[in-house]
Image (tube, rainbow, N blue to C red):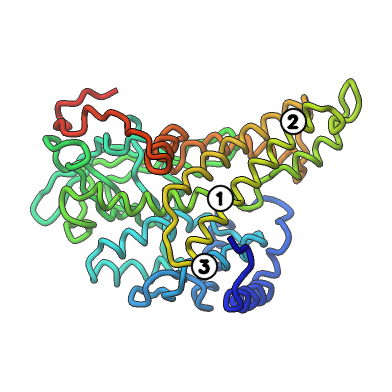
Amino acid sequence: MDFNDTPAEAEYRAKVRAWIEANAAEYLEPPAAPYGLDEFVARSKAWQAKKHDAGYAGLTWPKEVGGQGLSPMHQIIFNQEESRTYVPTGLYSIGLGMCIPTVFTHGTPEIIARYVPKALRGEEVWCQLFSEPVAGSDLASIRTRAVRDGDEWVVNGQKVWTSFAHRSDFGIIVTRTDFDAPKHKGLTMFIVDMKAPGVEVRPIRQMSGSSDFNEVFFTDVRIPDSHRLGAVGDGWKVALTTLMHERLAVGGKPRHAPGYRTLLEVAKGIETDTGPAIERADVRQRIADTYIADEGVKLTQMRALSALSKGAIPGPEQSIAKVVVAKTMQDMSAFALDLAEGAGLAVTPGSDLERLQQSYMWSAGLRIAGGTDEILRNIIAERVLGLPGDLRPDKDTPFSQLKPL
């Protein structure tokens, strides 16, 4: 495994770095205070438009849909350089990372022409409407119903944990169109206008103080059949396209997330009954555990980069990185806050302890988003280690005969 750029990759990296330094000068340091939602959205749209106009949006997308037609390594290099800054990008992580690739893979030419260019420039924001109160990790158990009425479909049901639904213009929604088919075979995917009559978005207040997640209710929402993605009943196949992109997107460590170095600095500044925390054997052991986990994830991701550089597609090994990252973040943050005792509650804004506090509150969601730990461990067991698959007695049972949990 060679961790160094090829000459061509090094040349591209230098070009990207120079462009970012020239165009993201105000984001080279963290903001003095968190942005309000309106400012975050405005800054996100401005940065996405700037990337688009410079040819740095949709790097791996086909040229015929407005992308650059470059290799995954070009996108990775750009992401690495962009991650050195504090530019706001999260508003588009769902839409451009998961939704729009699904649209241009399964949509008609007319749908692609209408939606992809505006999304790529950041003019329209997208969300992903998958999870439901009784169907989280078991996505095929959804109950949101779509019934055909001439050239339209009438949708009724509820989705939950939908990121940025309250700021989205459109979404992709998976629905159940056949309750008498087995649960994986009665699904159909659509594009839905988030401003359409009958769509109600309710932000969910999180313990971190933010409201990124939402629950969304659909009451007699009408969707044209022209906005169907894939064939009727092929929703699971279409959803797999989205999920493949989602797990790749959430598999790595979040930008600027605290790591073992943060824990090391916090331990240096905490006094315990026996002296500085950094001198305690148990503290040093936890720092070492975090370092090992961080390095393991780094090397696993390097393996994926190595595969990409050779033209291969990273496999289910990406699930390993997500399982380790989420659990390590939660365990490390909880340990640091316990070690700080009362100081772990009344943190100073901008301090390492505040970063760890935010990490602790966010990491619980990270262990669910993009597949729970349990689902991903099954993927690792079955597709990486080759162990026997779980028994699935409901696989061929009509959905209407299944009892909800």
Report the front residue among 56 and 208: 56
The percent coordinates of residue 238 (x first, y second) are 27, 53
Q: Secondary structure at mark 3?
A: helix
Quarter that holds the N terminus: bottom right
Q: Secondary structure at mark 1?
A: helix
Circle 2: is it few (<14), some (14-19), or many (20+) Cα within 10 Å?
Answer: some
Q: Which residue is mark 2?
A: 344
Q: For marks 3 and 2, give the CA distance.
A: 40 Å
Q: Which residue is mark 1?
A: 300
Choose mark 1 or mark 2, whichever is in front.
1
Image vertical order of residue 343 relative to residue 213, above or below = above
Q: Are marks 1 and 2 in contact (CB under 8 Å)?
A: no
Residue depicted at 25% across the width and 53% down the height: 190
Residue depicted at 15% across the width and 51% down the height: 232
Q: Check residue 73 in the rendering and tell me which mark sits there, or answer none.
A: 3
| Mark positioned earlier in the residue sequence (3 or 2) | 3
Q: Check residue 27 in the rendering and tell me which mark sits there, or answer none.
A: none
Choose mark 3 or mark 1, whichever is in front.
1
Choose mark 3 or mark 2, whichever is in front.
3
Circle 1: is it few (<14), some (14-19), or many (20+) Cα within 10 Å?
Answer: some
Instruction: Mark yes or no: residue 263 visible.
Output: yes
Q: Is residue 276 left or right of residue 77?
A: right
Instruction: Mark yes or no: residue 136 visible.
Output: no
Q: For marks 3 and 1, give the CA distance.
A: 16 Å
The amino acid type of the residue labelled 1 equals: Thr
